[in-house]
Image: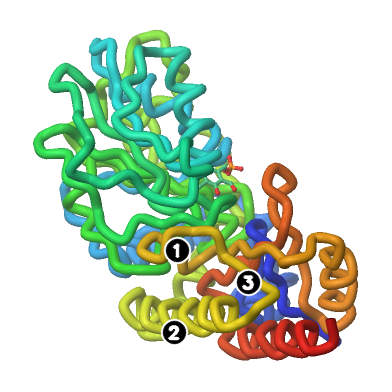
Amino acid sequence: MSRIFNFSAGPSMLPVEVLEIAKQELLDWQGSGMSVMEMSHRGKQFMAIAETLKNDLIELMAIPANYKVLFLQGGASAQFALIPQNILNGQHKASYVNTGAWSTSAIKEASKYCQVQIVASAEASGFTTIPALNDWHIDSDTAYLHYTSNETIHGVEFSDIPDSGAIPLVCDMSSNILSREFDVSRYGLIYAGTQKNMGPAGVTVVIVREDLVGLAAANVPAVFDYAQQAKGDSMLNTPATYNWYLLGLVLQWLKKQGGVAAIEQRNINKAKKLYRAIDDSNLYRNPVDVAYRSRMNVPFVLADAALDKEFLQLAEKQGLGSLPGHRSVGGMRASIYNAMPEAGIDALIEFMVEFERTH
Ligand SMILES: Cc1ncc(COP(=O)(O)O)c(C=O)c1O
């Protein structure tokens, strides 16, 4: 068996220990005589898996008791539309910060349901920075303030949680959830697709403060209504059972690593090493404002774009996979989520140094 270092932005690398457990338990989960895939979601075995999953997430993120934790479908993209439908609560305006492609998508969807106030935008910079927080003006007649804590495509990450005062703060945390500590009590709602830092694709985590639950308009379909999903333990329809199980295994792995604080330290070290290698070279460049460089997604360009193809081909041959940048921006991008070991960063740096030396 040979496994590559997979720098994909998502779906992305999973801890090998998790895959080993899934392999061992594939045909017979803990003496049940069946695969988790084959279990009824109402049966006692799966109910135990679901309960452990939820409790582990609550523990890892220190989620306060006044929050509901939902495991839904449709990805973060569905939430772009479901958040306004669930929490506008009859108001006509919502505020958004535009820091990149994913904020832009969230804004586009929300605009179908309400007037969107753009509080701040980094578009003029080519999405290479975060607009200074004290320049933000948030209208008082707004239902919530939305931001994207890490822009996966541009490699731009908030270093702090913005202060929205009494206005509920809503965050797309898809690409940095569980990678660093977040004070959940600062948020009205957090959502994230699981396919980057949490497990395979197919589950969307929504963590929502209780006062924002039960506000959906009457015409919102039941499966999209947070209150009904919360009441039904996210099982209003048949959940993505096997993905819940895999997500649970990743959370147990994370607990064994020492939890979020410990993995955050490792993520800081990994990112530091890679940015230093980029900054120390004459061939590679990262365009992002140093204060807002992402610890999770590290985009970089080569001084001579004509070398891109060869760089990627040789990297692939060395077992360094999925390094092309997003199709909308080009260049390279190394996504280095929780499951990327430090050895993967070292191997990438070693390759980059050697490529520069020979080119
Ligand atoms: C920050 C962010 N938000 C939203 C999305 C969209 O997620 P999904 O494909 O789960 O709808 C992504 C996907 O890469 C993302 O990185």
Where is residue 82? Give x, y as percent: 44, 26
Check the image and report above or below for 19 versus 12.
below
Q: Quadrant of the N terminus?
A: bottom right
Check the image and report above or below for 339 versus 90.
below
Where is residue 165? Give x, y as percent: 11, 39
Residue position marked by numbered label 1 in the rendering: 293
Checking the image for residue 269, the label placed there is 2
Where is residue 7? Give x, y as percent: 68, 69
Mark closest to the chain's N terminus, 1 or 2: 2
* Left or right of 249 on screen, residue 345: right
**Decide: marks 1, 3 in contact (CB < 8 A)?**
no
Could you say which is closer to the camera, residue 235 or residue 347? 347
Indicate which label's residue lies in the foreground, 2 or 3: 2
Quarter of image, res 255? bottom left
For image coordinates 41% across by 45% down, the residue present is 148
* Left or right of 350 on screen, residue 287: left
Mark closest to the chain's N terminus, 2 or 3: 3
